[in-house]
Amino acid sequence: MSVIEEIKQQAQVEQAKQQRAYQVLQNEKSMPVKMWTNGVVVDDNSKKQLLQTAQMPFIYKWMAVMPDVHFGLGATIGSVIPTKGAIIPAAVGVDIGCGMMATRTNLTASDLPDNLHALRTELERLIPHGMTKRGRDKGSWETPPEMVDQAWAGLVADFELICAKHPRLKNTNNRKQLGTLGTGNHFVEICLDEHDHVWIMLHSGSRGVGNAIGNHFIELARKDMQKHFINLPNKDLAYLVEGTEHFDDYWFAVGWAQRFAMMNREIMMQAAIKALATIIPKPLNAKLEAVNCHHNYVQKEQHYGEEVMVTRKGAVSAKLGQYGIIPGSMGAKSFIVRGLGNQESFCSCSHGAGRVMSRAEAKRRFTVEDQIAQTEGVECRKDAAVIDEIPSAYKPIEDVMKAQQDLVEVVYTLRQVVCVKG
């Protein structure tokens, strides 16, 4: 082989490496699993769960896995699961429509007060959130405000149709949780970008009613499997077959829950804008740029010339030019991104940093002092109840972003200055 031919071959190898930014996981029973996890640790339990999901006979072409991947119920969080002819309710999950919203304002860092405690308090006052010490839900309205009633008026008719066939869903905490924040990793934040512009960013989903819908149809799917003597690699992979009554009911209900989640974030955003306007006297414009995106959901999309149901469990749509949000943990960077339309990922990207340990393990391993140190400079809760959200419980967001450079490009880099946790 001549020197010129060797150089050409090496160039082709390097080009192939650049084009293939993923690893492939597969066994003799499964479809391929393409993993954008270079430089990111993936535990063995997650790999096992991915291969179990990839065994399902209705997977379309392959699964795509994002760098924030970690073990979850039914399917691994950070999974993109394209299917034809069936859907797995537990893969969509019970926090249906969970996602992010961010809005850039006309304010800058210099407009913020030196002490941000009053701003956090006002956000907490205007947005129902959290639990009491005895575990009672505080994340509900006693009397919903007018904007909640107006939003519910656009949702109630379809909800009544769902309840007519599935009456156990009627008594869920629905209208009173519209416009409220969940617990766990849900949050409302005030952030600054690299130009010191002030952003409002929040994370929430379909709350109690979405949880009830998810669990109800997961149970129905399991019963369908038992009825038809279908053996599964994991009982949480129970599925609904397209064209059946349960499938049609689920598709209608999950679409409704995703609309609820989208509206939930919009109402909270209005409340957060009101909190900023109350604390800061400067005229406020909060409509400069806005993004509202799900990261736990299912929808029909066109891929490789066919209509496919794409379940994103902890993943964001990243079509060419489409904006998305990838948050870090408390005290870490977050990113407003623009999709690169990578077809092999089914036009997807990660939904965050991804946990490296359970909440119980984080509470065993870290102290309040650790939490205080790791959230220095952020006005937020620093107590034992939020240790499970400490930054060290998550993967380094820089590694996650590096692993998906061919999926998205960063438009803005944000850092929190105020964080409200449920």
Image: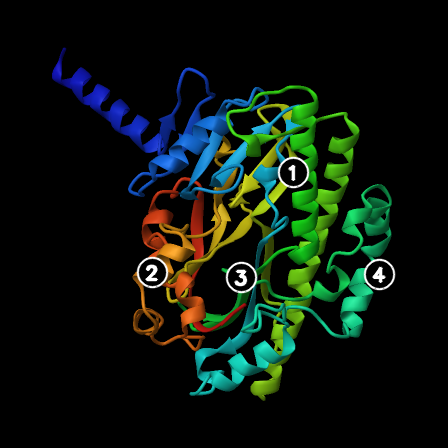
Kind of residue indicated by mark 3? His
Of tags 3 and 1, the one toward the viewer is 1
Q: Are marks 2 and 4 in contact (CB under 8 Å)?
A: no
Between disc 1 and disc 4, whose residue precedes? 4
Asked which secondary structure carries label 4, the reply is helix
Q: Is residue 241 left or right of residue 410?
A: right
Q: Amino acid at mark 4?
A: Ala
Q: Residue at x 36, y 76 (%)?
A: 377
Marking on residue 153: 4
| CA separation in Å, label 2 and label 4 | 45 Å
Residue 179 location, x and y as percent? 68, 66
- Frontmost of labels 3 and 4 is 3
Three-letter residue code for mark 2? Arg
Give the CA separation, mark 3 to mark 4: 25 Å
Task: Report, in whole angstroms, how far the alpha carbon at label 1 lies from the one at label 4.
Answer: 28 Å
Confirm or deny contact between disc 2 and disc 1 (CB under 8 A).
Answer: no
Question: Does residue 267 appear left or right of residue 359 in this picture?
Answer: right
Residue tagged 2: 364
Question: Given the current orientation, which residue lies at the most extreme front position?
Answer: 134
Can the viewer see residue 341 in this picture? no
Task: Return the disc, 2 or 3, that comes first in the chain's sequence.
Answer: 3
Residue 140 sits in quarter: bottom right
